[in-house]
């Protein structure tokens, strides 16, 4: 994300940050904005677990699990 947008989002609430994230037009941020109403530790953990599962499936031939 551009430094100016990062600064704009800085300490805002998640609802306010979502509007800034939309401006960034970054696929990962767009997914977060569209999929989550709340971005708390439980959602971060769930998202992390999903990304790990995805990575393991995509690159299973390249890594030992």
Image: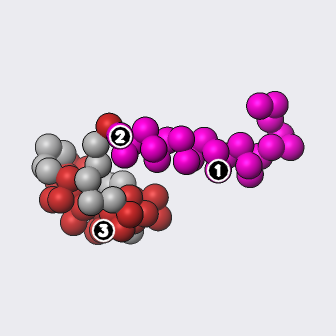
Q: Nearer the viewer, mark 3 or mark 1?
A: 1
Q: Rounded to the nearest whole Å, what is the CA distance between mark 2 and mark 3?
A: 22 Å
Q: Position of residue 2 (x, y in %)?
A: 33, 55
Q: Rounded to the nearest whole Å, what is the CA distance between mark 1 and mark 2?
A: 18 Å
User: Which quadrant, please, contains the C terminus?
Assistant: top right
Please say whether residue 50 is one of the residues in the magenta stretch: yes
Q: Position of residue 51 (x, y in %)?
A: 56, 47
For label 3, count other residues whose C-alpha is less than 10 Å away and answer few (under 14), some (14-19) or many (20+). some
Residue that numbered label 3 is attached to:
22
Q: Which residue shows up at 38% across the image and 63% down it?
A: 35
| Magenta span dominant secondary structure | helix
Q: Which residue shows up at 26% across the image and 53% down it?
A: 38
Q: Where does the magenta region start and end?
A: 42-65
Q: Which residue shows up at 20% across the image and 53% down it?
A: 14
Check the image and name the residue furthest to the right.
Answer: 61
- Element under disc 3: helix
Where is 16 relative to 55, above or below?
below
Where is 39 relative to 22, above or below?
above
Q: Rounded to the nearest whole Å, what is the CA distance between mark 3 and mark 1?
A: 24 Å
Chain-order first, disc 1 or disc 2 = 2
Chain-order first, disc 2 or disc 3 = 3
Q: Nearer the viewer, mark 1 or mark 2?
A: 2
- Element under disc 2: helix
Please say whether residue 2 is one of the residues in the magenta stretch: no
Left or right, 44 with reference to 14: right
Residue that numbered label 1 is attached to:
54
Q: Position of residue 57 (x, y in %)?
A: 74, 49
Residue that numbered label 2 is attached to:
42
- The answer to whether any part of residue 4 appears in the image is no
Left or right, 55 with reference to 14: right
Q: Are marks 2 and 3 in contact (CB under 8 Å)?
A: no
């Amino acid at each position: 994300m551009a430094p100016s947008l990062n600064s704009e989002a800085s300490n805002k609430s998640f609802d306010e940050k979502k509007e800034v994230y939309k401006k960034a037009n970054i696929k990962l941020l767009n997914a977060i904005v569209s999929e989550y109403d709340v971005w708390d530790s439980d959602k971060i953990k769930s998202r992390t677990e999903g990304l790990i599962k995805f990575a393991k499936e995509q690159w299973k031939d390249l890594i030992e699990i």
